[in-house]
Image: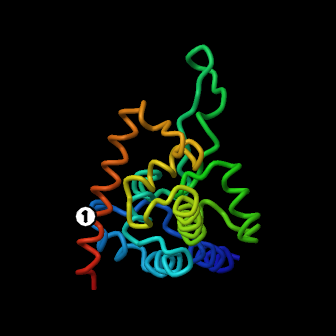
């Protein structure tokens, strides 16, 4: 019986994935060294949708800090009673429920999960291609791609970000991080 419990624990442990976010998130090579399957997922989304790896990575960095189960902050009623979350954003991509549902329907990916890195990169590529088609945003324009990602296609076309200095600043951070990742990716082994 003792051996059976040990075997069960080993099998269960071997199925578990490291859900902690990678360290050294300012280094694209380090991130990809820590998560060996991620580059394949990023390149697949790049091939499918035309979304550059460095832009996808910068969006994921800003949206979830590479955390599979990232969620928005909780809202509290009367200061201490949990009353939900700011939005339904979840996972690596921080996709909202409705937008994720649109992605699943339009790509016939009903089993896709926001906490799955491969699915999240595919979603980001799909969304970036929609931004390219709807608003003419170049696929390698991390700044405007991020603004459209955050505000939605219609919000971007209406310029809703123009009155949000904090968001313009965040889009600048994404642009800078994408450029940094692009430079680093040239030297990854």
Query: How many residues crowd mark 1 within 10 Å: few (<14), some (14–19), many (20+)?
Result: some
Q: Quadrant of residue 3?
A: bottom right
Establish if 63 lies above or below 73: below
Q: Position of residue 19 (x, y in %)?
A: 50, 62
Q: Quadrant of residue 2?
A: bottom right
Establish if 127 lies above or below 73: below
* Rendered residue at 51%/81% (across/down): 47
Residue reaching furthest to the bottom: 189
Q: Position of residue 109 (x, y in %)?
A: 73, 70
Number of marks present in the image shown? 1
Q: Position of residue 156 (x, y in %)?
A: 51, 45
Establish if 63 lies above or below 16: above
| Quarter placement of the C terminus | bottom left
| Quarter placement of the N terminus | bottom right
* Rendered residue at 28%/61% (across/down): 24
* Rendered residue at 53%/36% (across/down): 73
Establish if 65 lies above or below 122: above
Q: Is residue 4 left or right of residue 165?
A: right
Q: Position of residue 96 (x, y in %)?
A: 63, 48
* Rendered residue at 57%/32% (across/down): 74
Q: Is residue 47 left or right of residue 3?
A: left
Give the residue pinned by disc 1: 180
Residue reaching furthest to the top: 78
Label 1 sits on a secondary structure element that is helix
Q: Quadrant of residue 69?
A: bottom right
Q: Is residue 42 left or right of residue 103?
A: left
How has the structure been colored for display? rainbow
């Amino acid at each position: 019986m003792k051996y059976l419990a040990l075997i069960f624990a080993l099998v269960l442990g071997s199925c578990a994935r490291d859900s902690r976010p990678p360290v050294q998130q300012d280094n694209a090579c380090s991130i990809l060294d820590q998560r060996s399957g991620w580059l394949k997922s990023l390149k697949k989304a790049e091939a499918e949708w035309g979304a550059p790896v460095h832009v996808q990575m910068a969006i994921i960095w800003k949206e979830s800090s590479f955390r599979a189960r990232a969620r928005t902050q909780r809202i509290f009623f009367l200061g201490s009673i949990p009353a939900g979350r700011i939005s339904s954003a979840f996972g690596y991509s921080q996709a909202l429920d409705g937008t994720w549902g649109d992605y699943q329907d339009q790509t016939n990916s009903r089993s896709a999960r926001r906490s799955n890195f491969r699915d999240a990169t595919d979603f980001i590529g799909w969304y970036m291609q929609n931004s390219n088609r709807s608003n003419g945003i170049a696929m390698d324009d991390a700044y405007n791609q991020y603004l459209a990602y955050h505000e939605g296609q219609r919000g971007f076309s209406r310029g809703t970000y123009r009155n949000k200095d904090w968001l313009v600043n965040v889009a600048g951070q994404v642009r800078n991080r994408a450029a940094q990742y692009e430079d680093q990716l040239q030297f990854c082994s």
